Image (spheres, coloured by chain):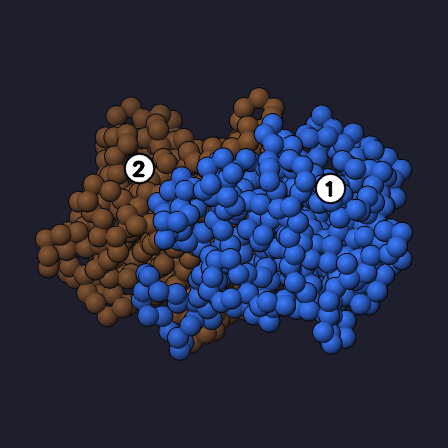
Chain colours: A brown, B blue
């Protein structure tokens, strides 16, 4: 089960291929429905110890996938909806690198010399795991809007079933940023005796109302696109790309900070040093950048998956789901050691959310470590500030 | 020229009617085109002094209009695109009150016992002043996308021409919030010998890149709506309401602060205390609120006007337009006394922007007064925090 690597670069997880596993049993969902069949796309890096006690599960965020590290054996074809890599924001996708390649590999934060790192695509996604674009066995057509509304807990149940199918019972750690951090928290609460440690980065126990609002606006942009067709756009030759583009632009600005945009673009105009008096064309560099982000995203991500995953992360609320409204009660059973990392300029998943979790765990006498990294890259810092996260994570895991 | 008032409430500007004036001459625009005819919608409150030296021009923001104070003589018809009042955010529109009624009237911040207050709808608007929904004399059809791309300077030129037509040469003061504050600044720079004082609230000399991005996203949402039809939707029986709704939602969240949304909605669900597992329906109160804001806005505002005005306010850049890139050089000729008010939680027009203007004026030895009001209502504070602005403004103007 080790990674096949052809002369990997130093620190690289090597050349990797996404694999697929069909779960033997249906997955029972929060909404009351069961889902079957469920396929899970995954990659692994490093070697599983004979005692099977070195497994580290890495959880991706909204737009991620199972290709977390190394170089894709089969680079994603350009311009196709199925071929994508998560890390387009800094160009790594073009080189086929995993979205957290800077964090996973020999000697890296999640050290493949020590850990058997497993990355899966989440339930509801469009990176090979069953989602709204998968075939509904009841109709032979893509699920579309008939796909059940899944929750973060459902995603974690799926990860649990997947690991069981691989013969893995315990996890040395679960790690993730943003929605990935929500899943790490859910693992620690839901399966307290099966997780030794969690690494929760740029995440929260419940998204604040402004974050709920941004996600609602992004979904509205898709829902209001006539090409969404009530979710049944597969096979029509069209897709709600216009709305998805707007959704991505909204998301993108929330992932960055105002100072980051100031530093990267300022108010620089695209052409010479004067305006051209146009309503329809980009004038400022930041406007052009957003259009580019939108058009590259719609080529690699399914709009229905976006809707379902965005909904799941707004629903996520540890206190409501596990504590009758009390975060302390929700966290009462946690046995895992917890590492929380937040970023000073992250206004979507602000440090205050991590602090609330840390304080609740501390009050319960649980082992918890909390760091706020001073950075200006906003929420995206969890993908960009690898050098500053690495020593913290390595020390915590050692 | 005094306001006709039927038994006004104490402090009220009384019952007012929007009036219209056709400018005698064409308006020359920054883009090189001239516009003719130009009609200006306006209201006045108080009495013009025989010396004509008590005129105070009030400038509205993106979604405002000429009905700044008092009670509309003809309440806006419900559900029509033409009938609107700007202040829907707090429900005042339903009562026909002007968008700044709390600030304009006898004894108020802009005291109609002393000043002859004039409010106009801006060039490019949809509240009676010539804009993209007006008839193009060249075709007999609405301008639509053939309307020239106007700037803040063009709006101010139009205001200047309008006041001249009224027989008014000097202004005791120009006041406005947000885009209205930009116009006050433009007045002081463009016509330094005709303005005694400016009151610039929650505004800036140049919108920061994140604000440019939000405006670009709002415009994209409209441009990508198939019902926009390249701007030629008038008479089609349809309008880009879907995209306009998304634009309004984006704008609305940027006008508020995260703590304001937390305080107003928290994560409260709409129905009982559990989720219903739905992608298409609002679940959180904040989601429902945004949908309501969107649907009420599209009934009262023209999408093309939104596009043009949003573009103008992103273009606005005193340093680029008047100082060859230097704010100090741009402000060098200002003769008006300047009052700047900003709000601590306003992240769209943050206090830092006001501070830059104040520092530049101070360095030039100009009379300037700067206040930052501690509030949690974000950018909307300029419409809501009337009681706290009033003593500052009254003292400054006295």
Image quadrant where residue A195 sits: bottom left
- Regarding residue A154, the answer to whether it shows in the image is no
Residue at 47% across, 32% down: A281
Chain name for mark 2: A
Which quadrant, please, contains the N terminus of chain B? bottom right
| Label 1 neighbour load within 10 Å: few <14, some 14-19, many 20+ | some
Q: Which residue is mark 2?
A: A299
Q: In the image, residue A309 lies at what x, y percent?
A: 34, 54
Image position of B386 (left or right of A226): right
Which quadrant, please, contains the C terminus of chain B? bottom right
Are labels 1 and 2 assigned to the same chain? no
Q: Which residue is mark 1?
A: B160
- Against B65, residue A380 (above or below) is above
| Label 2 neighbour load within 10 Å: few <14, some 14-19, many 20+ | some
Image quadrant where residue A79 sits: top left
Q: In the image, residue B122 lies at what x, y percent?
A: 63, 47
């Amino acid at each position: 089960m080790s990674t096949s690597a052809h002369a990997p670069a130093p620190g690289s997880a090597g050349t990797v291929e996404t694999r697929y596993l069909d779960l033997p049993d249906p997955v029972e969902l929060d909404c009351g429905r069961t889902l079957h069949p469920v396929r899970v796309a995954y990659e692994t890096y490093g070697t599983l110890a004979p005692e099977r006690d070195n497994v580290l599960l890495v959880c991706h965020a909204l737009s991620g996938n199972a290709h977390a590290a190394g170089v894709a054996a089969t680079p994603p074809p350009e311009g196709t909806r199925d071929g994508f890599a998560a890390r387009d924001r800094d160009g790594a996708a073009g080189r086929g690198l995993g979205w957290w390649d800077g964090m996973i590999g020999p000697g890296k934060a999640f050290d493949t010399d020590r850990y058997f790192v497993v990355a899966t695509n989440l339930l509801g996604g469009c990176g090979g795991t069953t989602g709204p674009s998968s075939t509904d066995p009841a109709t032979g057509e893509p699920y579309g809007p008939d796909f059940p509304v899944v929750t973060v807990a459902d995603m974690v149940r799926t990860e649990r079933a997947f690991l069981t199918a691989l013969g893995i019972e315990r996890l040395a750690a679960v790690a993730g940023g943003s929605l990935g951090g929500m899943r790490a928290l859910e693992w620690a609460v839901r399966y307290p005796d099966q997780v030794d440690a969690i690494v929760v980065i740029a995440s929260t126990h419940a998204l604040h109302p402004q974050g709920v609002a941004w996600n609602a606006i992004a979904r509205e942009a898709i829902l209001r696109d006539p090409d969404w067709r009530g979710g049944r756009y597969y096979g029509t030759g069209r897709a709600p790309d216009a709305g998805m583009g707007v959704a991505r632009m909204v998301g993108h600005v929330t992932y960055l900070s105002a100072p980051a945009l100031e530093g990267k673009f300022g108010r620089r105009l695209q052409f010479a040093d004067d305006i051209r008096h146009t309503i329809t064309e980009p004038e400022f560099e930041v406007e052009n950048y957003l259009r580019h982000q939108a058009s590259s995203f719609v080529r690699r991500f399914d709009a229905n998956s976006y809707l379902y995953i965005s909904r799941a992360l707004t629903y996520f609320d540890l206190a409501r789901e596990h504590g009758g409204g009390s975060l302390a009660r929700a966290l009462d059973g946690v046995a895992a050691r917890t590492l929380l990392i937040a970023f000073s300029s992250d206004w979507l998943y602000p440090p205050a959310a991590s602090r609330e979790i840390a304080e609740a765990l501390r009050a319960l006498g649980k082992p918890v470590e909390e760091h706020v990294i001073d950075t200006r890259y906003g929420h995206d810092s969890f993908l960009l500030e690898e050098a500053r996260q690495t020593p913290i994570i390595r020390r915590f895991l050692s």
